[in-house]
Amino acid sequence: MYRAKELTVATRGRGFYDITSDVQRAVEEIGAREGLCTIFMHHTSASLLLCENADPDVRKDLESFFSRLVKDGDPLFRHDAEGPDDMPAHVRTVLTQNSLSVPVKNGEANLGTWQGLYVWEHRTSPHHRRITVSVVS
């Protein structure tokens, strides 16, 4: 059986937004006891991340690495219709992921002890990001 819930995440600009409790709540509302949960991002300038949730320095280090790897305003990029962070946001998304799969066990997303689910906003301005959480059981 397939069931889904849609989430909207308001971002304040580039950074990480913890959606672990939102996804857990969606899985609970879906009502599946066992199965596979897919979290899908409906955008091309933000991505999803399953990452350590204990030490925020992990996420800071990821942002530092990507800032060095894909620079805003790089003259290499022609696509800048929405500003100097436009194409870099697309590159960051392509290099990361826009969907995640997590097992469902005992009615919840079965994450590891130190795992959290995050929206990684790659644009510098605020956005509303649409995410679908679906479970196949």
Image: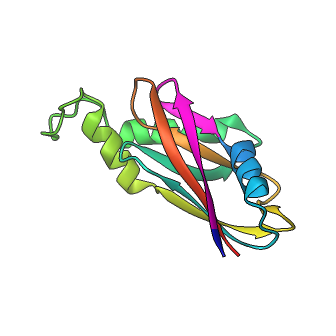
Of the pair 29 and 79, the residue shown nearer to us: 29
Residue at 57% over, 51% down: 49
Residue at 40% over, 26% down: 124
Name the main secondary structure of what is drawn in magenta: strand
From the viewer's perspective, tell me whether residue 88 is left or right of residue 98: left
Classify 99 as above or below 74.
Answer: below
The number of numbered discs placed on residues in the rendered structure image is 0
Q: Is residue 31 visible?
A: yes
From the viewer's perspective, tell me whether residue 107 is left or right of residue 137: right
Q: Is residue 70 visible?
A: no
Of the pair 92 and 99, the residue shown nearer to us: 99
Q: Is residue 129 magenta?
A: no
Q: Is residue 6 magenta?
A: yes
* Percent position of residue 10, x then y: 54, 30
Residue at 37% over, 42% down: 45
Q: What quarter of the picture does the C terminus occupy?
A: bottom right
Q: What quarter of the picture does the N terminus occupy?
A: bottom right
Q: Residue furthest right?
A: 106
* Percent position of residue 60, x then y: 58, 34
* Percent position of residue 131, x then y: 53, 48
Of the pair 92 and 21, the residue shown nearer to us: 21
Residue at 23% over, 29% down: 82
Q: Which residues are magenta?
A: 3-18
From the viewer's perspective, tell me whether residue 118 is left or right of residue 137: left
* Percent position of residue 34, x then y: 79, 73
